[in-house]
Amino acid sequence: MSFCHLPVLFKKGSFLFFLFLVPMFSVKAQTDSTQTSLTSPQSILKDRLFLPCPAATRSEPRPHNLMGNPPSPEQETRLIIDDGKKRLVIFAEEMNALGTHNLIEDIKNSYTAEEKPDYTFYESRSADGLAEVYTIPLKHDTTKDAILITSLIIQTKDSALIQIGAYLNPAAFRDLPAYQDLVKNILHAVRSGTRSLPYKARKEALPLFGNLSNLLFPCPDNFIVNTEQGYDFNVTQIRRLPPITYKVSGGIVIYSGRHPSLMAPEYQFKPEQAKEKSGLFLKTKIKWAVYTDKKRKICLQETIYDAPAPNTGLKIHLALVAASEKELAELLKIVENMGLKTLGE
């Protein structure tokens, strides 16, 4: 459930294994998917962008474990283009970060000196003038099921960044030049969507406790909110929207369900490192566990307790993650200003 580090650039993607986890479908009446016209406009991240694609393109979320969070359509989009045994996957993801005045250099600097020679970087503009940076790998690991051939970071009209990666399976990789041309045509045709990220100061009302209640709170500037609903739980993430150069974006996780798990192990914190602290959330006294690692610039404050929803067996997992104790205190203020409204009141 961790989220504090900015989404990793696709050169190091952690869930590429899932990109190709669906059976192949033969695309009938299609002689060569690399030569088809782009007649199927695809919505990216619930209308954040529109991407013209071949007619055979279909949008399918990544498979997920029943106990885990389902992929959020506002956070990721997976497009699949099959041609017999050949497969192209275009995977788009919110970076949950803002662009900079020197985007290409900041992207280059995310690669080590040893990695940079393995990539070509260049700037471009989308069909309607959005700033783009392409990263093209010069080396490919053909033993993988998902082989990255192009990565694009695009700065939208609201200044937030979206990353789009194009992957081939080994069968399609044998036609690499043709697929490179197809991907180039698709990505260069990307257009602005109709939805922007709401990150100005505002009031939020979010589902909680299996939609039994709404969580009400004033959301400050430069924070985005995303709620994911699983089989028997809700997870709301309230995260800071920092520049891409910032290493720890920070934010708040609120889980309501029956199977919470602590985040401390994900950040390599041990139980004996915790400092106990009393607090109040939704008029309930709670005990926080607070972890600080100044060297890694990670601060974590979390608790799990019984939800104020009688006879439901629901638990609340509340976690705050920041780069400093000062930022942690700012997140705590947001939490302390939260209220609860039972539906029907």
Image (cartoon, rainbow, N blue to C red):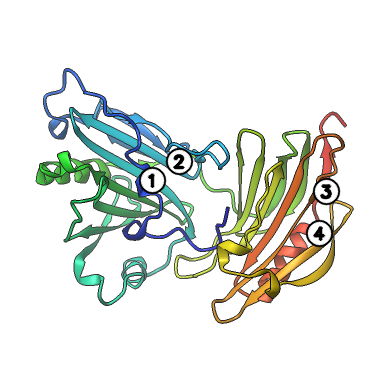
Q: Give the structural element (helix, strand or loop) at label 1.
A: strand
Mark 3 is on which residue type? Answer: Gly
Q: Which mark sits nearer the N-terminus, 1 or 2? A: 2
Residue 326 visible here: no
Residue at figure coordinates x 37%, y 38% from the top left: 78
Q: Nearer the viewer, residue 12 or 336?
A: 12
Q: Give the structural element (helix, strand or loop) at label 4.
A: helix
Spatial CA distance of label 3 from label 2 is 30 Å
Spatial CA distance of label 1 from label 3 is 34 Å
Spatial CA distance of label 4 from label 1 is 35 Å
Question: Which x, y percent locates residue 131?
Answer: 34, 56
Q: Report the residue marked by disc 3.
A: 339
Q: Report the residue marked by disc 4.
A: 336
Q: Report the residue marked by disc 2.
A: 45
Residue at figure coordinates x 34%, y 67% from the top left: 107
Q: Residues within 10 Å of mark 4 (few under 14, many from 20)?
A: some
Q: Residues within 10 Å of mark 3 (few under 14, many from 20)?
A: some
**CB within 8 Å, label 1 to label 2:** yes
Question: Which x, y percent locates residue 86?
Answer: 18, 34
Q: Report the residue marked by disc 1.
A: 92
Mark 2 is on which residue type? Answer: Leu
**CB within 8 Å, label 3 to label 2:** no
The C terminus, quarter of image: top right
Question: Which x, y percent locates residue 240?
Answer: 59, 60
